[in-house]
Image (cartoon, rainbow, N blue to C red):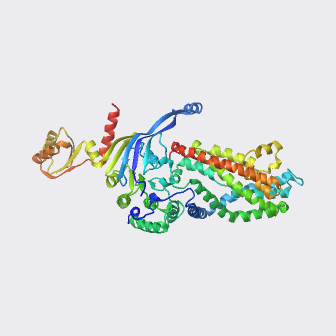
Amino acid sequence: MIGREGIVVDGMSKTYRVPVRDAGLSAAFRSVVRRAKRTVSAVDNVSFTISPGEVVGFIGPNGAGKTTTLKLLTGLLEPSAGTARVNGHIPWRRSPEYLGTLALIAGQRSQLQWDLPVVDSFALNKAIYRIGDGDFATRVRELTELLDLGDLMNRPSRNLSLGERMKCEFAASLLHAPQLLFLDEPTIGLDLETQRRIREFVVEFNSRQGSTVMLTSHYMADVEAMCKRVILIHQGRILFDGQLRELTSRFAAGKSVRAELGRVDADREGELRRLFAEHEYHLVGNQVQISVPAGLVAAVTNRLLTNFDVVDLTVTEPDLESVIEAAFAHSESRSNG
Amino acid sequence: MTPWLADDRRSVSDRKYGRWRGLPTYYRAQLEMSLGIYLAYRAQVVGWLAGSLIQPLVLIPAWQTTTGDGQIGGYSQGLFVTYFVVETLVTFLTLNFVVIEFGARVQHGYFSQVLLRPVHPIHHDICTVVAYRIVGAVVMVPSLLLLTVVFGADTSALSMSGLVAFLPAVLLASLMRFVLEWMVGCLAFWFVRTSALNAAYYSMMLLLSGSLMPLSVLPQWAQSGAAATPFPWMVAFPVEVAMGTRTGAQVWMGLGWQVVWTCVIVLLLPLVWKHAARRHSAVGG
C-alpha cells in the first residue's frame, strides 16, 4: 500500500490581509478612498507530525487557528509559508489521488443533498470515489448497522433532525474508507446520547480501519473519549503537543480533595479555616472541596482525617477544561511578559 | 465492521483518478441527482420557464406595433415573431445559472465541500445544466409552439438547411456561454459580492446578444461593435442561422468565430480557476 506516511507539518503559517476601518459613516467614506488593511496571522509557524492511525485532538479557543489548520491540511487553503506533506501529498495541490483519501466532517456543514433522500447522496459518493458495487453494499450495510441509520436512508436530508443528519453525514463521508479523517466540531449541537454514539463510532472506525483522525472540538468529552494525544493551539501557535495525561500533569495546578464531613458547626468551620487557610476551599453544607498542590495531597488528607469526622473522601484530577484554561492562562501570562 | 482497508486490495490509496477515468459513471450519477432535485421542485422550474417566456410576450407585441405594415432591419411583423420564438429557444438551450450561483457559493462558503471532492466542480455544473434542459423541455417546447400560433409567426424563413446548420451553431453557443460564464463566475472569488458584476454582465448580454432585438435593427457601428464581443455568437448567430439570414460562407465564418471564442476561453479557464481557487483562502468558508 502506498502513501501511508502520516501528516508532517513543518513551519506552516497562514496570514490574511483583512480590511480594517474605524466605526462610523465618515470612516466608511474614508475607506472608499484609502483602504487600510492589516495582516492577521491565523496560523503561525506550526510544526507537528502525526503517525498513520493516530487520533489527535486539536484544541484551542475560537480563532486559535484550528479550523485554518484543518483547511490547510485538506487542501482548501494554501499556506503563506512552510510546508506540509500528508501521506506523501502536498495537500493544497489538491490532486484527486489525495482528495480521494480524505474526509472532512464539519458539524456546521453538510455534504448531503438537502432535497433528496440520503441514499441518493450515498449513490453520488459511490460514483465520485469510484467505489465498487460489492464494497459499496458492504459498507452501506455496516455503516447503517453501526450508526443505526435504519429508515433514515430514504428520507430527504431536510427532514432529518440534527443528530440524524450528522449520523448520515458520517456514513456518507466514510463510504470511501478514507485514510484521513478530519473532524471539525463533529458533535456541536448534538444531544448527549448522539454525542456518545458518534464518539464510540469514531473510536471503533479508527481501531478497525487504522485511519488517521484529527479532531477539533470544544467538548472536552470528545477529546477525552477519542484522543490519547492532544495539540493545543492558541493565537496560531502550538502551546502543547503530547499525551493527554502529560497535559494534565504539566498544567494542572494540583488535585481536588473532596470530603463529606459527619458534623459541621461553627467550631468545625473555624477549625477548617485555621487548618486550610493556605488552600482554596469551598464548604457547602457538610461537603468540603479543597484545591491542593500535587505534592501536598497526602498531608491535607491526613489533616482532614485526623481532625474531622470524615464520612467519605475522594481525590480527583482537575477536569480537562480547567487544565486547558490553565494552559491558555499560562501562555498569556508569558506572552504579556 | 470488517477492516475495509486491510481487506480491500483496491483500497483508497491505490485508487486511480485519471483526468477522464470514471467520469462517465460520475456524470450518470450526478445527472440523476440533478434531475432528482429539479423534479423535487417542479413549481420552481415552471416558474423559471414562465419567467423566460415573459420577455417574448412583451417584446413581440412591442416590435409588431413598431413595425406596423412595413419592415425594420429586414423584419416584418411575422418575422419578428419567428425571431423571438427562435431566440427564446436559443436562450433556453444556452442559459445557465453559473454566474449567479458562484456568488452564493463563494459568499456562503458552499465551495468547500465541492473542492474536497476528487472531481473538478465544472462537471457538477455541466450535469446541472443538462438536467435543467431535460426537465425544462417538457414545458418550453409546447410554450414555443403556442407562441408561434398565437402571434402568427412567419415560418417561411425556416428551412431544412437552416435548421441543420442551427444544430452545431446552438451547441457551440451553449458550450461557449457555459465556459464564458464559468470564467465570469470565478470572479466571485475576487469580488465576493457579485451582484454589481452580474448586473453588468447580464446588461451587456441583453443589449449585445440580440436578446432584446435583432442586431440588424442597430446602426452599423453598433453591429460591428457587438460582433467584436462574444455576446452575439451565443444568441443572435444561431437565431439568424435558423432563420436563413446567414447562409453559406457566413455560417462557416460564424461557426469559426464560435470555435475561436470557445477555444480562447477554454484555454484561459484553467488559469483563472487556479488563481480563483487560491483566492478561496481569502474568503474562508
Number of marks: 0
Find residue B166 and report its image quarter: bottom right
Taking the image as shown, residue A55 lies to the left or right of residue B123, namely: left
Picture quarter with the N terminus of chain B: bottom left
Which residue of the protein is positioned furthest toward the front in this rendering?
A1
Find residue A150 and report its image quarter: bottom left
Q: Is residue A283 visible?
A: no
Is A90 drawn above or below residue B153 in the view shown?
above
Nearest to the observer: residue B129 or residue A206: A206
Measuring from the top left, give residue A18's x and y in whole percent: 51, 37
Taking the image as shown, residue A267 lies to the left or right of residue A207, namely: left
Measuring from the top left, give residue B91's x and y in whole percent: 71, 56
Measuring from the top left, give residue A30's x and y in whole percent: 57, 30
The residue sitting at 53% across, 62% down in the picture is A127
Is A252 drawn above or below residue B92 in the view shown?
above
Find residue A252 and report its image quarter: top left
The residue sitting at 65% across, 50% down in the picture is B266
Nearest to the observer: residue A164 or residue A110: A110
